[in-house]
Amino acid sequence: TLIELLVVFAVVGVLAGGVFTAINPLKRIQQANDAKIKNDISQIAQAEQAYFTSSSGQTYALTVGALVTSNDLKAAPVAPTGSSYNITGGAADIAVWAPLTETGAGWYCWQSSTGVSKISASVPSGATCP
C-alpha cells in the first residue's frame, strides 16, 4: 500500500542520512588532497636531490620551474588548492612546503639538510621545517 511504501522510503532516507554523516565526504576529500600534496612534495624533493647532484656548483633549484627546465621534474605539480609549492632558503639548503587542506593539519615540509619530510604546526621559514 501507499503507507507502507512511504514508511520504507522514510527508513531508507534515515539510513542513508546516517551513512552519509558517518562517511563525512568533506573530510575524505581533504585527506585525499593532503595525500596529493605529500606525494607532490616527495617528487619535488627527489628532483631537488637529482638537481643538487648533477649541478656543477652543488646547489638546489630555487623554483619548481628550474627543476622542469633541467628535466629533473617532468611537469610542475599544482597543489589541489590551485597554488604552487613553496621553495624557501638559499642555494645550499632549502625547504619545500605547502599548507595541508585538512583543518588544523598545518604544513607539510621537506628539509634538504635532513632529507626528512614532516608536518609542521607553524609556517616554515628559510630552509627550516619547524
Image (tube, rainbow, N blue to C red):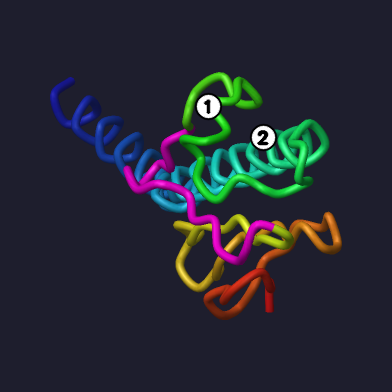
Sequence-wise, which precedes: disc 2 or disc 1? 2
Going by the numbered disc 1, the residue's amino acid type is: Val
Q: Is residue 129 left or right of residue 102?
A: right
Instruction: Report the front residue among 35 and 111.
Output: 111
Q: Is residue 20 left or right of residue 34?
A: left
Residue at image coords 38%, 39%: 16
Going by the numbered disc 2, the residue's amino acid type is: Gln
Instruction: Report the front residue among 56 and 91.
Output: 56
Q: Which residue is mark 2?
A: 43
* Vertical side of 22 occupied by 105: above or below: below
Q: Is residue 22 left or right of residue 5?
A: right
Task: Specify the quadrant of the image occupied by residue 52.
Answer: top right
Bounds of the magenta segment: 77-91
Which quadrant is the C terminus positioned in? bottom right
Q: Position of residue 1 (x, y in %)?
A: 18, 20
Mark 2 crowdedness (10 Å alpha carbons): few <14, some 14-19, many ≥20: some
Mark 1 crowdedness (10 Å alpha carbons): few <14, some 14-19, many ≥20: some
Secondary structure that dominates the magenta span: loop
Q: Position of residue 103 (x, y in %)?
A: 45, 67
The secondary structure type at the circle numbered 2 is helix
Distance (Cα) linking label 2 and label 1: 12 Å
Q: Which residue is mark 1?
A: 68
